[in-house]
Every structure is written in C-alpha cells, then in structure tokens.
Amino acid sequence: MIQLEPISGIFKRERALLAAFPMRMLIVKEGAGFLCMNSGDYMLASGRIFFIPEEGLVRLEGEIKSGYWLTFSSLLYAEFLLQHLDPMAKNLFLNLSFRDLAQQESTKTYSLLDQLRREINARNDLPFLAQYLSLFLGYTAGLDGYLAALTLDELQQVLRFRAILEQYYKQERAIQFYAEGMGMSASKLNRFLDRVLGKSLAALIKDRIMREAEALLTHSDYSIDEIANLLGFEQTANFNSSFKRYKGISVFQFSKQALLN
C-alpha cells in the first residue's frame, strides 16, 4: 500500500525509476539536474517536492545527494481526499506539480518522513498509515495551513490523536479514553484540540462518524440499519436524526441522491 525509500546517486534518463504503487512523490533534500516526464523536463532543486501523476515513466538526469522516493496506493490517496474537499487536493496528482519548501518546512518534512519510514517498518496498520499520509500530504501541499504554525512535536501529537481516533471512533466517546492514549490529562487534551484543530473531541468524533456514514451509504451494500449498528448507534432513529442534523437531509434522501449520481 505504501513504500518509502531514501534515494541518492547519479541518474541517467535512460533508466526509469521503479514505482511500487501509482501515486508518486519525489522529495529532493539536496540535488541538481532534471526530472524528466513526457510532459517535459523539470528542474531538480534542493528543498523541492514533486507530486507526480499516475501516467508516464519517471526519469532523472543529474545527481540527488539526499532525498526520498515515496509511492502509495490510490486507496490511501482516497482517504486524503475524504479529508480534503478543496479542489486543489483532487488536482494534486492530476498533472506534475512541485512545491519549494522553506527551510523550516523542509526540516519538519524530513522529520515526518523519517518517522513515516519507522512506522512502515514497524508494520503499523493501514488506518494509522492512512492518517499519517493524509497529514503529510496536507502539510507538504500547503492545503492544511494551520499545520505550518505547529512545532514538530505538535505535528506528531496531531498524528497520534488522529491515529487513535481512527481506531476507536466507532465505540469510544469519552475524553478520558483519548487523553490516556495521548498521555495527557483530559483538560490538556481539550485545550490542545481546541487550539490546534479548532474543534472539541465530540465534534471531531461526530465529523469522523458522519464521514464514514457517507462513505458506507455511497459505496457499500449495507442497509441503513446495518450502517447504524456499525457506527455504534443503538437505534437507527438516532442515526437518522444525527445524520440529518449534520447534513441537512435524511439518510434516505442522501442514499437516493448517491444512487442517482
């Protein structure tokens, strides 16, 4: 589902880079030369991060002294898109694009990549890696502006919280449970979530549940009763009322629209 490798050396364009998965990123820590695609040649530069579309071979001409080659599945990218409705997110890998990172951004990016490699090597579960990748893409693409102001430690805390939330949102609602997982008091976690994410734990859990409800109603064969049960609602009526307050339409109306689309 995801592969991250350090990349360095002198490259000739006659040989294409191998990609384990269709979504591809080249992060150049230090290098010079060109990234060569059918659409043209793009200059390699230190601190430059490339978002590479699925189509076409990737060839390099030049030297990379230090960098990373990241490839991942469309399934992991889909999780990122569920969290980022901005059209820029959908277009991120449509055509080759790149972003030059400032020094402080570069330092955080490389630290996040080193941590991601450790998580991959530790064979962490897919939901955890999906959350990490989503945070990484949002940060490096400049889509999650609030992340830019965070320290590296705060970025890691956001990641840890998202991973815990992803694993337990269907059955756990208590602030104390998440606080213990984060290694902090309930009041400190509340302050952290409000300051960094701008929402309470209850709002974040509800957002995640409703996002999952939309995905299940759109892409699964489960009945409404089964979806309500999967998401931790004791009664379907509670699920219906909660969904309508959140989306402004009933579960039935949403399902009907999804079917028509």
Image (tube, rainbow, N blue to C red):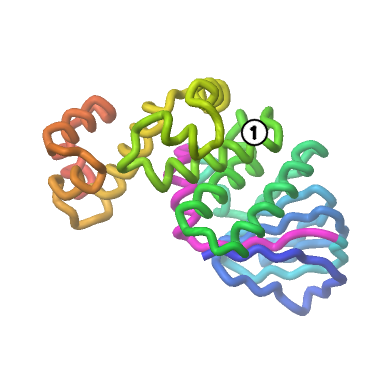
Picture residue at 69% right of the left edge, 68% below the top: 58
Q: Please state which amino acid type lies under the numbered disc 1.
A: Glu
SS label for mark 1: helix
Tell whether 250 sits left or right of 40.
left
Residue 45 included in the magenta stretch of the image: no
Picture residue at 75% right of the left edge, 49% below the top: 110
Residue 225 x, y percent position in the rendering: 13, 46
Residue 147 x, y percent position in the rendering: 63, 33
For label 1, count other residues whose C-alpha is less than 10 Å away and answer few (under 14), some (14-19) or many (20+): some
Residue 139 x, y percent position in the rendering: 63, 40
Residue 242 x, y percent position in the rendering: 22, 29
Q: Is residue 88 above or below residue 31?
A: above
Q: Is residue 13 above or below residue 205?
A: below
Picture residue at 79% right of the left edge, 74% below the top: 13
* Quarter of the rendering containing residue 155: top right
Residue 74 included in the magenta stretch of the image: yes
Mark 1, residue position: 154
Tell whether 75 sits left or right of 182.
left
Picture residue at 82% right of the left edge, 39% below the top: 103
Q: Which residues are magenta?
A: 66-85
Total numbered badges shown on the rendered structure: 1
| In front of the other: 145 or 157 | 157
Tell whether 221 sits left or right of 76.
left
